[in-house]
Image (cartoon, grey):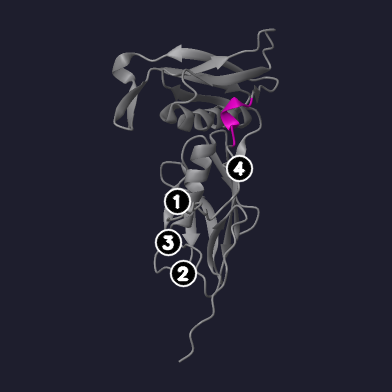
Amino acid sequence: MYSIWRTSTRYFSTSRLCLSNIGKKPIKITDGVSYSIESIPIEFCKTFTKRNKRFVLDRQIVVKGPLGAIRTELPKFIHIHTPPEGDNHQISVKVERPLNKTQRSLWGTIRSAIQNAIIGTSEGHLSIVKFVGTGYRAIIEKNEKGEDVVALKIGFPYTPKLVVPPGLKVSSPNPARLVIEGCDKQQVKLFASLIREYKKPEPYKGKGIFVDGETIVLKERKIK
């Protein structure tokens, strides 16, 4: 007779899958900030495709505060709810089908975007850009149109100049530092990343442009 041996599957990790569930967390609305839901005309609606399905962003939540207003587009399956007791200082984000992969993947993303809008319109967002290298620095000047321009001195035979986008404020506490401020977190981080693209940190001498406490592990040079 032959004996039957049962074999068990061995996995690389025995820990359980841990989900952040950030979409379920309520959002606190600070004093001086208000929001409203507005519909977008169909001819101005943006669309996106995910898992071979097309979704229309036909609504938007408008968050207004002391520092400005930010609009965030919403798909049909996203709903904004206030608590039953009518507390206007707290809202929650819901989806129609929480078990649907597409809706669940965008649940936390849209919730974070709304929270960033509330923080940005009340307190603002900032990004710190640090220049590391001999002679590396940034100069804030005006162009012929009166716009603020960031001129980069980073060892090139030319001087790259970037126009500061509307809604952002750039200051320089010292020649090797730039502070970018604005109510839209996406625009603040995007402008900081555009500056970083001109001289990314290199791993041998540690020179380059660093953003928001960025660090790099130095490598040893190969000696022949």
Q: Residue type at mark 3: give it.
A: Thr
Bounds of the magenta span? 20-25
The span from disc 2 to disc 1 (Cα, nearest Å) is: 17 Å
Residue linked to disc 3: 159
Q: Residues within 10 Å of mark 3 (few under 14, many from 20)?
A: few
**110 to 188, vertically: above or below:** above
Q: Residue type at mark 2: give it.
A: Gly
**Identity of the residue furthest to the top in this view:** 85
Mark 4 vs mark 1: which is more N-terminal?
4
Mark 2 vs mark 1: which is more N-terminal?
2
- The residue lying at 59 percent from left, 50 percent from top is 14
> Depth check: 5 or 151 in front?
5
Residue linked to disc 2: 155
Where does residue 61 sit, x and y in percent of width and height? Answer: 50, 19
The span from disc 4 to disc 1 (Cα, nearest Å) is: 15 Å
Q: Residues within 10 Å of mark 2 (few under 14, many from 20)?
A: few
Judging from the image, what secondary structure is the residue with disc 3 in? loop
The span from disc 2 to disc 4 (Cα, nearest Å) is: 26 Å
Judging from the image, what secondary structure is the residue with disc 2 in? loop
Residue linked to disc 4: 126
The span from disc 3 to disc 4 (Cα, nearest Å) is: 25 Å
- The residue lying at 46 percent from left, 52 percent from top is 4
Asked if the residue under mark 4 is in contact with the one under mark 2, i.e. CB atoms within 8 Å, the reply is no
Asked if the residue under mark 1 is in contact with the one under mark 4, i.e. CB atoms within 8 Å, the reply is no
The span from disc 3 to disc 2 (Cα, nearest Å) is: 9 Å
Q: Residue type at mark 1: give it.
A: Leu
